[in-house]
Amino acid sequence: MNESLTKIRQDFDRIALHDQEAWDHNRHYHGFLLKQLPSQCQTALDIGCGTGEFSRLLSKRFERVVAIDLSSNMIEVAKQRSSQFSNIDFQVTDVLHWELVAEQFDVIISIATLHHLPVGSLLSNLKTALKPGGRLIILDLLEHESWRDQLSDFVAVPLNWLLQSLHNRHIQPSLEAVAAMREHLRTDEYLTLSQARTIYSTAMGKAKLRKHLFWRYSVVWEKPRAAQQPQDVLTIERCSS
């Protein structure tokens, strides 16, 4: 494991010890992500599952969910919180060195994880692991690149404050939790919209890329069935939430 991934694992091992299941920007988009799921719901892969919150949502729609994370502490917390969900297989796994079986999953989803990884080289393996007609669904963080992006902060910042106040008013994070997150964010790096557009259009052909309000972007790509021909078109949308 390289030095960067070692630090990421250590960061999230530390963050997991203080998790309080609070509302955050990733959770805000869970409803949106659920609407992107394919109708065929047998097997799903959740990459970077963390404490397993979205894995548990997937388990209500899929016969089997494989949920992986680099952090052993995250997986331990996920297992503790998911004891009633017998169809989730939690694994401590580095997806970069995990042998993915071809056409194994109906959906592969990743939330706020791919910015830690070499996205371009990983996408090829993820595409192979999808069944024909399966979907790759990604939500990740986005870096500002223009004054237009900065203008969106005039809406995002006060709305974030309001939602934090409504959802997390009874949660008081410990000093240790704050310090752990600050240390992780100190070295976090994200794609700009232009960079994301280049990477996904090169690797995936037809896909739908959306820019979201809370410093996130999403990508939805459906693997063509045998009778279909892939189209090299990347659709980009801007969402208000």
Image (tube, rainbow, N blue to C red):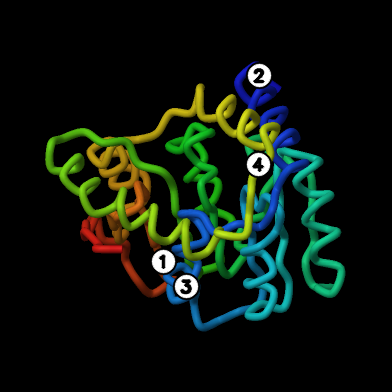
Residue name at image x 79 percent, y 72 percent = 87
Identify the mark nearer the N-term, 4 or 2.
2
Disc 1 or 2, which lies upstream in sequence?
2
Q: Residues within 10 Å of mark 3 (few under 14, many from 20)?
A: few
Q: Which residue is mark 1?
A: 222
Give the CA distance from mark 3 to mark 1: 19 Å
Dot 2 surroundings within 10 Å: few (below 14), some, or many (20 or more)? few
SS type, badge 3: helix
Dot 1 or dot 4: first in sequence order is: 4
| Gap between marks 4 and 2 measured at Cα | 13 Å
Mark 2 element type: loop
Question: What residue does disc 2 label?
Answer: 2
Which amino acid type is shown beneath numbered disc 4? Val
Q: Name the residue carrying label 3.
A: 31
Viewer-side label of 2, 3: 3
* Contact (Cβ within 8 Å) of mark 1 with mark 4: no
Q: 64 and 228: which one is in front?
A: 64
Q: Which of the 4 image quarters holds residue 120?
A: top left
